[in-house]
Amino acid sequence: MSMTERVAPVIAASSAPPVYHPAGFDAALRTAVDDLSAGRWLSAERLLTTPSPTPAVWTFWTQVLALVAARSAVLGEWAREHPDARGLGVLRLRVMVEHALTADRAGRPQAWKLEQAARVACWTAAHADPADPVPWVCLLALAVLDRDRSLPEHRVRSTDPMLPAGPWGMFDEVLRRDPVGREAHHRMYRYWQQESRSAALDFVHMVTTNALPGSPIAALPLYASVDQYRTAPRRDAVVRGQWRRDPHFSNTQRAYRSWRSAEPGSWTVSDLSHLAHALWASAQMDAAVEVFEALGVLASRTPWSDVAESREMGEVVLLTARQQAFAGRATALA
């Protein structure tokens, strides 16, 4: 078989339609999500009774399931049938938080009441199950709504003199229970991004400097790079080329090295999508191919929709990036 014959199927596979699913690589979670979307909760209940999931896995399961449940009344039906089911209370807590955040974004009059109810429920859950990181993650999610820092838990001093006071106590509580704390790190980044771009970047630098090899926290600077590009006043050739310059280029290389030392499946589809994009955008095509192969047909909407000319064109950018990477072309659109 010639080289052309061997390469052609690979390039053809790079054109396969992407599959967007919040469960990512987790097959059991995928089943639970699909059933919950259809109003069936038994597979979610079975999943949440899995013996001794790691705190990182537990946090991810509840995050994904709650985003699905927030769009329906399925948790109410579940509670009527099995009110004491493990994980049901945590899902209901997460749904309360999601409804509060959604109401705030939409400027609804009931947003403040939803926020207060969710915050009380978080503190109650944190005291009821001291080992669970999720109530503390939920408190971090709600922290963005306290824009004037009226609550004392949002004015805790950082151990890093470069960073301002903020919800550091809650962040530390998560990490005591979940040393990976992927969602907590992203929640803190979003909190600081709302406060100050410089504080957000200082936070990213601090946590990635201290991250262990293989940690998905190494991907956090890639999200910051996309945010910088997305909010740039114009997207000329200089801005589009940012991934070929430091610190973006070095951050991409560090994230790639960290991913290669990680346990399979420990990085989310979103993390790998950001890594694949950064490698492609910095013309590191061999490494980009490696990440695209790990993703298979799975994909996330971001970062592709954030770097496209319009959000609707995100998939076009993704397919272009995959094709260029597999073809070995050292060019990129963003």
Image (tube, rainbow, N blue to C red):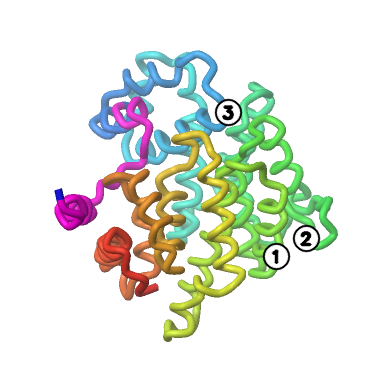
How far apart marks 2 and 1 lie (CA) works out to 6 Å
Badge 3 density bin: few <14, some 14–19, many ≥20, Cα 10 Å: many
Q: Earlier in the sequence, mark 2 or mark 1?
A: 2
Q: Residue 315 appears at what percent x and percent y?
A: 26, 61
> Badges 2 and 1: C-beta atoms under 8 Å apart?
yes
Q: Residue 323 appears at what percent x and percent y?
A: 25, 62
How far apart marks 1 and 3 lie (CA) works out to 28 Å
Q: Earlier in the sequence, mark 1 or mark 3?
A: 3
- Residue range highlighted in magenta: 2-31
73 over 310 or under it: above or below? above
Find disc 3 in the rendering and name its residue.
55
Find disc 2 in the rendering and name its residue.
163
The three-letter code of the residue at mark 1 reads: Ala
The three-letter code of the residue at mark 3 reads: Pro
| Mark linked to residue 162 | none
Badge 1 density bin: few <14, some 14–19, many ≥20, Cα 10 Å: some
The three-letter code of the residue at mark 2 reads: Leu
